[in-house]
Image (spheres, helix red, strand yellow):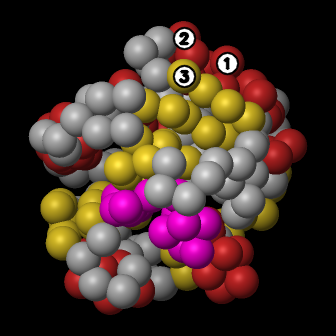
């Protein structure tokens, strides 16, 4: 997956912004819900936050407080440093977080959790709980998906094709999976859950 995200880094935000290969997609009320997602993140209390799999910093830029972004992809981190310069960044593995216990008030991850298969998922949750007091997960809503999970073929601007595991969530389902939590947003396109 590292190679896929390294390759995708310069075009990753096209998905959010409806550009490039995503320009023709019909996503009713996408922009309004994306703006709501930004507000949900901006309304989180300022905290020492670890943004795991921060990618290009597209969501990181909306976090308040002392923010550290972690990603396995050096190219993603380069994009993040440009887009969200208020944060600091470190390259690392989300399943083996290089931090001591309780180093953060909050661990946040956006559109990463839904790519984890069961063993990776359990490992990530254990690590997130080890280093942070609360976990906030942003991921894809199940509203526009006929399936809960599948292998998705991703095509990049260079024509390369990649197989990526993808899951979709309801707010209630994600909260239950995280062991309980508060649904901060549940829309047609995104869900956000905060768990202690």
User: Which callout, 3 or 2, points to the residue nearer the camera?
Assistant: 3
Looking at the image, residue 139 lies above or below residue 89: below
Spot occupied by residue 105 in the image (x, y as percentages of width and height): 36, 50
Q: Are marks 1 and 3 in contact (CB under 8 Å)?
A: no
Real-space Cα separation, disc 3 to disc 2, in angstroms? 11 Å
Q: Which residues are magenta?
A: 125-139
Pointer 3 local density, CA inside 10 Å: few below 14, some 14–19, many at least 20 = some
Spot occupied by residue 82 in the image (x, y as percentages of width and height): 54, 11
Q: Give the left or right position of residue 161, taking residue 28 as reference.
A: right
The residue labelled by disc 2 is 82
Looking at the image, residue 113 lies above or below residue 111: below
Q: Secondary structure at mark 2?
A: helix
Picture residue at 51% right of the left edge, 33% below the top: 68
Which mark identifies residue 88? Answer: 3
Question: Of callouts 1 and 3, which one flags the residue occurring earlier in the amino acid sequence?
Answer: 1
Picture residue at 40% right of the left edge, 80% below the top: 178
């Amino acid at each position: 997956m590292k190679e896929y995200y390294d390759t995708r880094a310069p075009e990753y935000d096209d998905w959010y912004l409806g550009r490039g290969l995503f320009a023709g997609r019909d996503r009713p009320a996408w922009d309004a819900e994306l703006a709501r997602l930004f507000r949900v993140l901006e309304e989180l209390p300022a905290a020492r936050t670890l943004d795991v799999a921060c990618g290009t910093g597209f969501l990181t830029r909306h976090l308040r407080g002392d923010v550290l972004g972690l990603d396995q992809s050096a190219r993603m981190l380069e994009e993040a440093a440009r887009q969200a310069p208020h944060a600091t960044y470190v390259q690392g593995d989300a399943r083996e977080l290089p931090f001591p216990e309780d180093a953060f008030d909050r661990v946040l991850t956006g559109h990463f959790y839904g790519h984890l298969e069961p063993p990776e998922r359990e490992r990530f949750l254990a690590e997130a709980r080890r280093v942070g007091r609360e976990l906030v997960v942003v991921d894809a809503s199940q509203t526009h998906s006929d399936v809960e999970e599948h292998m998705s073929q991703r095509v990049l601007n260079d024509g390369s094709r990649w197989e990526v595991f993808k899951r979709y969530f309801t707010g209630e389902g994600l909260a239950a999976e995280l062991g309980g939590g508060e649904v901060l947003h549940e829309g047609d396109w995104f869900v956000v859950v905060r768990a202690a």
